[in-house]
Image: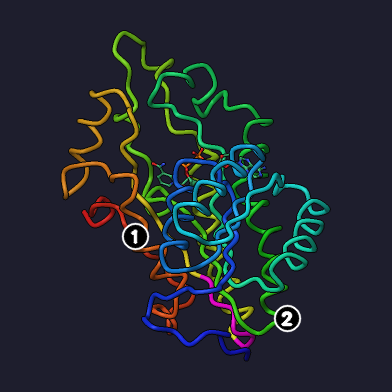
Amino acid sequence: MVEPATPRSSLFDLTGRVAVITGGAGLLGEQHARAIASEGGIPVLVDVSGRGAAEMAERISTEYRVPAWGCRVDITKVDELQGFLAQLLDRFGRLDILINNAANNPRVENGGAVNFSRFEHFPLAQWQADLAVGLTGAFLCSQVLGSEMARRGAGVIVNVASDLALIGPDQRVYRQPGLPPHLQPVKPVSYSAVKAGLLGLTRYLATYWSDRGVRANALCPGGVSNGQPQDFVVRLSELIPLGRMAHVDEYRGAILFLCSDASSYMTGAILAVDGGRTCW
Ligand SMILES: NC(=O)c1ccc[n+]([C@@H]2O[C@H](COP(=O)([O-])OP(=O)(O)OC[C@H]3O[C@@H](n4cnc5c(N)ncnc54)[C@H](O)[C@@H]3O)[C@@H](O)[C@H]2O)c1
């Protein structure tokens, strides 16, 4: 097993470690990147929005004085991932961390999904598209990038699942006034299937690479407060023991824990950071 190149000053120190974050241009991708950079790690943000990823990497490089990198990669395409890995190794010579974070996230709470979200009519094409990014994408990234870490004999994979990997959605929180029951929007079935699937992938990778120095764990975040309609926020908050949705930066600690040596004896585990929602 390869030892980290730099002596660690703290359990959470990530100095010099290269961390690929999929969906790096999104809401939480930025937060994961900031967490990595805050401990001296090098975040590499990949996204289908190459411009968003590159701009975010530039901001983080300036703010944290680390050589963050952002580029366009479609994680559903294995050839793009292989090309990306070659570029990454040319650039940094190592890969230490993979955060499988990208997903299709239809915002049903904002009223945009009334016409397609209900189970009886959920389009096959949407199901396939959601699984392609959230689950197949995580499989391909783990295969292409995880294999490089296994070859080196050290690495960490974090799969970003959801509280809805652990419980069924309470569809009452998505209700919109004035709509008959058969037209009420719901959390799409693909979301639950993708997130539960990620837990299976996590346990599989944990045992598969247990003798190759690669750890794999899953993070199950609860909903992040991000300008949702007030009635939705109130209904959801009532389901959460801490009585509120998460602030956008409240997963940074868990990401640092899972990506660093602080979690060195942890693999195949599921970490719920959800304000307590799944405990009652
Ligand atoms: N935001 C929340 O409240 C919340 C709660 C629980 C879990 N999560 C999970 O956290 C993760 C991040 O959520 P978010 O709110 O930042 O979502 P987001 O929609 O803001 O970001 C997702 C990113 O993934 C990218 N993406 C989509 N398809 C891709 C592909 N084929 N290749 C590469 N990138 C692709 C998108 O362009 C987007 O930038 C997701 O897995 C989500 O399910 C989020």
Residue that mark 1 sits on: 272
Amino acid type indicated by mark 1: Ala
Q: Nearer the viewer, residue 186 or 218?
A: 218
For residue 137, above or below residue 152: above
| Ligand 1 lies under 8 Å from the Cβ of mark 1 | no
Q: Quick one: label 2 or label 1, which is nearer the N terminus?
A: 2
Residue that mark 2 sits on: 151
Percent position of residue 89, x then y = 74, 68
Percent position of residue 185, x then y = 42, 22
Please state the extent of the stretch shown in magenta in the rendering: 211-216
Q: Are marks 2 and 1 in contact (CB under 8 Å)?
A: no
Q: Would you say residue 214 sits in the magenta stretch?
A: yes
Quadrant of the drawing holding the N terminus:
bottom right
Q: Residue at x 59, y 52 (%)?
A: 45
Percent position of residue 33, x then y = 49, 55
Mark 2 or 1, which is nearer the eye? 2
Q: Residue at x 63, y 49 (%)?
A: 70
Q: Nearer the viewer, residue 227 or 198?
A: 227
